[in-house]
Image (spheres, rainbow, N blue to C red):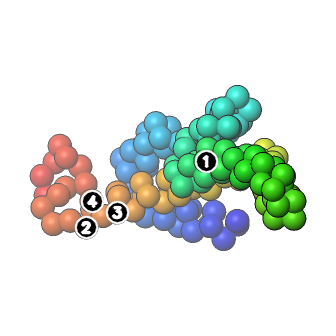
Amino acid sequence: MANQSERLIALKSGLDERELHILNIELDRRRKSTGVTFALWFFLSWLGLHKFYLGRIATGVLYVVAPWILILVFVVGFVMAESNPEAGGATAGLSLLALLVYGAWWVVDLFTIPRQVNAYNESLEYEIIASLNARKQRPGLSPNPTQPE
């Protein structure tokens, strides 16, 4: 963590005052909030909205789809158990176990939300700095749009 912080400090030291101002404005505008993420987790995690909010689309979709598939498999296994108790019981048992793992994942998310938000915001900061540096390196573009090169 300290190494990444040092890297960000080094990258920021290469920015001028105007670029630092732009960086801060963009970070304030686009950064994600731990409080909002917790609220989304608490009220709407069954829709995966806290994952979508942090830009984790695939994980958000998994959050939405996985429990329904597992519940369906559990019901099918339960119904199958009437005709084939061994196979139906195993299917229902495995899906129930998978649902428990899903529940554990949901609880673990609660405790990892601050780290997830920090990772998103740090990644955003790197992205903005890279964009500012790329803008400096493009020929014909002035770092200050009011002054031609």
Q: Depth check: give the residue in front, 110 or 63.
A: 63
Q: Name the residue under label 3.
A: 133
* Mark 4 or 1: the one toward you: 1
Q: Residue at x 43, y 39 (%)?
A: 25
- From the viewer's perspective, is 14 left or right of 50? left
- Residue 58, x across and y down, in percent: 54, 55
- Label 4–label 1 contact, CB within 8 A: no
Q: How far apart are marks 4 and 3 (CA)?
A: 5 Å
Label 3: element kind:
helix
* Mark 3 or mark 1: whose residue is earlier in sequence: 1
Q: Name the residue under label 1.
A: 65
| Amino acid type, callout 4 | Arg
- Label 4–label 2 contact, CB within 8 A: yes
Q: Name the residue under label 4.
A: 135
Q: How far apart are marks 3 and 1 (CA)?
A: 40 Å
Tally of marks = 4
Label 1: element kind:
helix
| Amino acid type, callout 2 | Gln
Q: Distance between the residues labelled 1 and 2?
A: 44 Å
Q: Which residue is drawn at 12% across and 61% down?
A: 140
Label 1 environment density (alpha carbons within 10 Å; few <14, some 14–19, many ≥20): some
Q: Mark 2 points at which residue?
A: 137
